[in-house]
Image (cartoon, rainbow, N blue to C red):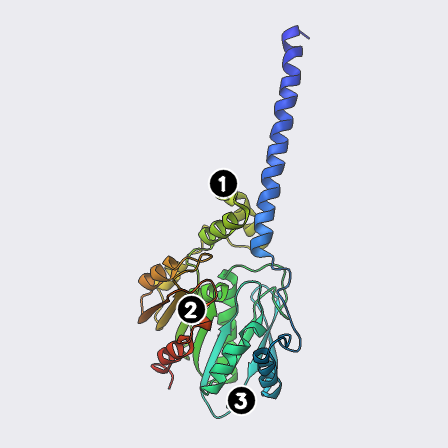
């Protein structure tokens, strides 16, 4: 071997080692972003309701224990067993709400809102979304596979109560599922939908959230993350479009968002409202951050006044 080739050999080894190390680091961080975004590690689940650490939550648990409650299950399109609470305190009423919780949550997180709906005469179906609560699954889909699950629950309820008049509700990830479902084939029993704090684009929201947590630019890693999404969740973030779904939506929709939301910026609600094809309203709550709208004093009245236009 010539002296020149001998000198070149260590350089090639160094370059090769650096390339392998760089590829490993790239893949490791992509896996980290994927798991943080799509693996909720079984969202918090309290089999007897929320832990009674305040008078309000104790009252919520008391209401739940006194309610006419059933545990329903169905099989998802990809063969997961999904669970929902069905609360039918008004057996003679046709008024129903299906409520979807947010990311890293479960159905019990919505008990205060369930109580409010119950007070206004609604029966309730409240699913644990996939990989959350008592539903099976390892990964969430940030609202895309969940919208198919929601349609399954709508059809389930329509078969159970054919005369049901249904309002849909979702918060953050649940809101994205509601927006996606609104633009799909949906039974006429669904009269309207309400979303709070939903994001319009899964990929862009993932980038925003991951960068705010890590401080590392995430966009260069998105192709690898999407490869993992395709492998484990069987869809591509590049192919799904909540904008397209809303453009096909015919049911009336209420969009609610906090003006000071730093996790899911309020521009999402404004753009979603612009995309929606049917009747629509937009409410922005001032001085309200992520997930905080439901604690605003006008929240419940605003939502149920909208619903009352279509389900009375």
Q: Position of residue 186 (x, y in %)?
A: 42, 72
* Figure check: 30 above or below 298: above
Q: Is residue 145 above or below residue 192?
A: above
Graded by Cα atoms within 10 Å as few (under 14), some (14 to 19) or many (20 or more), the crowding at tag 2 reads many
How far is mark 1 from mark 3, CA to CA?
51 Å
The residue identified by callout 2 is 195
Quarter of the rendering containing residue 14: top right
- Which is more toward the observer, 82 or 22? 22
Label 1 vs label 2: CA separation? Answer: 31 Å
Task: State the image coordinates of residue 308 (x, y, percent, origin top left).
Answer: 36, 82
Residue named by callout 3: 89
SS under mark 2: strand
- Mark 1: few, some, or many residues within 10 Å (few <14, many ≥20)? few
Find out whether the residues at labels 1 and 2 contact each other: C-beta distance under 8 Å.
no
Mark earlier in primary sequence (1, 2):
2
Tell me where residue 43 appears, x and y as whole percent.
61, 64
Residue 229 at x, y percent in the picture: 55, 51
For disc 1, the marked residue is 220
Q: Is residue 214 visible?
A: yes
């Amino acid at each position: 071997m010539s002296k020149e080739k001998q000198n070149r050999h260590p350089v090639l080894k160094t370059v090769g080692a650096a390339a392998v190390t760089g590829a490993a680091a790239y893949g490791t961080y992509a896996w980290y972003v994927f798991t943080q975004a799509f693996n909720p590690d079984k969202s918090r689940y309290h089999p007897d309701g929320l832990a009674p650490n305040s008078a309000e939550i104790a009252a919520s648990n008391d209401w739940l224990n006194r309610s006419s409650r059933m545990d329903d299950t169905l099989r998802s399109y990809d063969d997961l067993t999904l669970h929902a609470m069905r609360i039918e305190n008004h057996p003679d009423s046709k008024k129903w709400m299906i409520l979807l919780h947010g990311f890293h949550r479960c159905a019990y997180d919505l008990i205060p809102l369930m109580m409010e709906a119950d007070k206004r005469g609604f029966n309730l179906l409240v699913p644990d979304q996939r990989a959350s609560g008592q539903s099976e699954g390892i990964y969430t889909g940030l609202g895309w596979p969940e919208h198919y699950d929601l349609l399954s629950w709508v059809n389930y309820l329509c078969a159970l109560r054919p005369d049901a008049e249904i309002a849909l509700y979702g918060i953050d990830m649940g809101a994205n599922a509601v927006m996606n479902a609104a633009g799909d084939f949906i039974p006429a029993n669904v009269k309207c939908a309400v979303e709070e704090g939903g994001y319009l684009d899964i990929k862009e929201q993932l980038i925003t959230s991951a960068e705010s947590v890590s401080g590392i630019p995430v966009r260069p890693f998105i192709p690898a993350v999407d490869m993992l999404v395709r492998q484990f969740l069987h869809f591509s973030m590049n192919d799904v479009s909540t904008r397209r779904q809303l453009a096909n939506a015919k049911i009336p929709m209420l969009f609610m968002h906090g003006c000071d939301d730093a996790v899911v910026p309020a521009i999402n609600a404004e753009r979603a409202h612009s995309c929606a094809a049917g009747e629509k309203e937009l409410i922005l709550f001032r001085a309200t951050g992520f997930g905080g709208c439901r604690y605003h004093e006008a929240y419940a009245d605003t939502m149920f006044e909208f619903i009352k236009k279509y389900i009375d």
